[in-house]
Image (cartoon, rainbow, N blue to C red):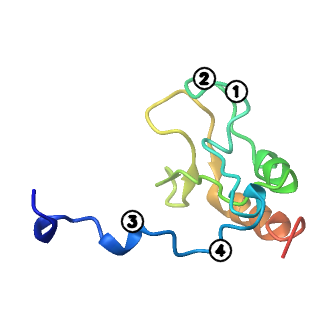
Amino acid sequence: MSPAGDIFNPEHYKVNQDMTQPLTNYYIASSHNTYLTGDQLLSQSRVDMYAYVLQAGCRCVEVDCWDGPDGEPIVHHGYTFTSKILFRNVVETINKYAFAKSQ
């Protein structure tokens, strides 16, 4: 319990970034289960959900990659009844929309 055994870096107790900007300059919009159109058990997975959240300003998206039945990677919420989409289509969509809102 001594400071010598503390795993937390003591330098991080001090604010070392410029904190004079508006909060929105520091916030990173993220998305969980980005590909789902509804609940995380039964809903549809759609590639256009990535385009939607990226155009809305989201900068961190989730891509749940799984081995597909034919060897091609798929994206879906594992061990649920959600539909599956091709990983290739997801990364193509991300490539198209990731930097359209901001550099």
**Residue occupying image coordinates x 78% and y 45%:** 49
Residue 11 drawn at (x, y percent): 36, 75
The reply to whether the C-beta atoms of the residues labelled 4 and 2 are less than 8 Å apart is no
Element type at marker 1? loop
In this rendering, the answer to whether 80 lies above or below 10 is above
User: Which kind of residue does numbered mark 1 sit on?
Assistant: Gly
- Reading the image, the residue beneath label 3 is 13
Quarter of the image with the N terminus in it: bottom left
**Residue occupying image coordinates x 49% and y 29%:** 80
Report how many numbered discs are placed on residues in the image: 4
User: Which kind of residue does numbered mark 2 sit on?
Assistant: Leu
Q: Earlier in the sequence, mark 1 or mark 3?
A: 3
- Reading the image, the residue beneath label 2 is 42
Task: Give the crowd class for mark 4: few <14, some 14-19, many >=20 residues within 10 Å.
Answer: few
- Reading the image, the residue beneath label 1 is 38
In this rendering, the answer to whether 89 lies above or below 83 is below
- Reading the image, the residue beneath label 4 is 18
User: Which kind of residue does numbered mark 4 sit on?
Assistant: Asp
Mark 4–mark 2 distance (CA, rounded to whole Å): 44 Å
The reply to whether the C-beta atoms of the residues labelled 2 and 1 are less than 8 Å apart is yes
Element type at marker 2? loop
Element type at marker 4? loop
Q: Nearer the viewer, mark 1 or mark 3?
A: 3
